[in-house]
Amino acid sequence: MSVSIASGIYTCNLPKPSNFRGNPENFCPIQVNPFRFTLPFHFKLSESRKCSKNKLLFPISASGITTETPQKQSFRSKNPKDINVLIVGSTGYIGRFVVKELAKRGYNVIAVAREKSGIRGKFGKEETLNQLTGANVCFSDVTNLDVLEKNLEKFGVDSIDVVISCLASRNGGIKDSWLIDYDATKNSLIAGRKLGASHFVLLSAICVQKPLLEFQRAKLKFEADLIEEAKIDDGFTYSIVRPTAFFKSLGGQVELVKDGKPYVMFGDGKLCACKPISEPDLASFIVDSILDEDKINQILPIGGPGKALTPLEQGEMLFKLAGKEPKFIKVPIEIMDFVIGVLDFLAKIFPSLEDAAEFGKIGRYYAAESMLILDPETGEYSAEQTPSYGRDTLEEFFQRVLTEGMAGQELGEQMIL
């Protein structure tokens, strides 16, 4: 089953059954020895050295200065260069931007990646290393806790300050959602905590406010685990980031409009709205969550700059930029309801079709639900209550894609997440 939705396009193909306070500039650097013995000198590997044997390319932390065992220091008193950040989901669409932003700000980055990364595992080790320039890359399977812990140990990591998870289900299927959005994410928390991590930044999703899908339920369960961990240990904190739509998910019809074809949307084009945020802006917000005091122990919904846009407004903007006469095809949402009903029925007979039914529900959700704050009092989505961040606009993105195409903006396996 493949489901594709981008600004209203929905294609359904049924397969055969089968916290941190203060200004970092004012911090006093505290050096922590990553080894089990005290080094008499400052240990630092050359940043130009190639990582050919899956070992540390950049120093995880500085050497000890005294043979005495100091009390554990909070990383809040350190400069970014002395803060060890473990990131899982590092080769994902947002994860790559987060790694780049972390490296730009001078953090010590340990990026966990699969040996075969990217959509359908199309990238090997060397390509992954090139994508994650500025990070120490540890190849491991995050779905297996024992394997993850052993690989981090072999890699030479014995001290972590912050864990960032950008993990997301590859296809939104029922089993994959729980394997990645919950189990693998929980593994990163456990492994990070054993290595001393005292803060966890989670990339979640704004749509979990109205959990009708399995991946949303999995994300919410882990969010609850994070909150409970902070209640149990007052030395542990979290930041849960819930972004609205990404630019890439709204770019699927750019080439069609450019070629003079109509813009497809559901209903009257006003069923859903969002405040889309660019990938670099979202990555910047996520990294802000490491040191910003107002982001400690908070659930942080976030959108991009400007007003909320409906599919109709997105289409009108695209036609104007392309210099084309607006042409729209309005598809009744009831068509999707019918397809989902058929899939649900067939899934009861053929259990292997459970994911196909789930993919249909995901497509329907994104076609009808706004990616904005859901007001609990009114039950309505509110653009006014949805925070904005960053500078990149959807209009600028559309203009760039009209000129350069969608290279680098490929969607996931089911083209919905």
Image: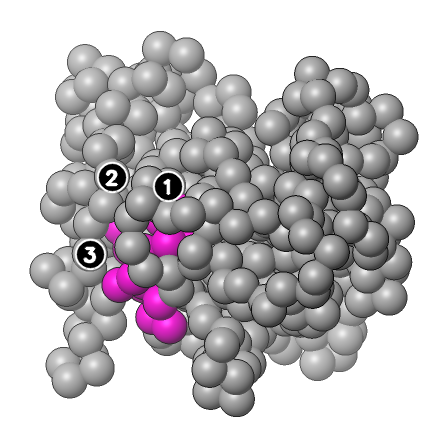
- Give the camera-side residue of 304 and 265: 304
**Structural distance between the alpha carbons of marks 2 and 1:** 8 Å
Badge 3 element: loop
Residue 139 location (% of width, % of height): 80, 43
- In the displayed structure image, the side of residue 84 where residue 324 appears, left or right: left
Magenta stretch in the rendered image: 285-303
- Residue that badge 1 annotates: 284
Does the residue at mark 2 contact the one at mark 3 (Cβ under 8 Å)? no
- Residue that badge 3 annotates: 387
**Residue 399 numbered mark, or none:** none
Crowd rating for badge 1 (residues with CA inside 10 Å; few <14, some 14–19, many 20+): some
- Residue that badge 2 annotates: 390
**Structural distance between the alpha carbons of marks 1 and 3:** 15 Å
Q: Is residue 9 visible?
A: no
Residue 135 location (% of width, % of height): 64, 34
Q: In percent of the image, x 60 and y 69: which residue is there?
A: 71
Give yes or no for residue 141 being in the magenta stretch: no
Does the residue at mark 1 contact the one at mark 3 (Cβ under 8 Å)? no
Which numbered disc flags the more N-terminal residue, 2 or 1? Answer: 1
Badge 1 element: helix
Q: Is residue 139 visible?
A: yes
Residue 321 location (% of width, % of height): 20, 18
Give yes or no for residue 288 being in the magenta stretch: yes
- In the displayed structure image, the side of residue 150 where residue 49 appears, left or right: left
- Give the camera-side residue of 300 and 64: 64
Q: Amino acid type of disc 3?
A: Pro
Coloration of the structure image: one colour
Badge 2 element: loop
Q: Amino acid type of disc 2?
A: Gly
Which numbered disc flags the more N-terminal residue, 1 or 3? Answer: 1
Q: Amino acid type of disc 1?
A: Ser
Q: In percent of the image, x 83 and y 35: which residue is there?
A: 55
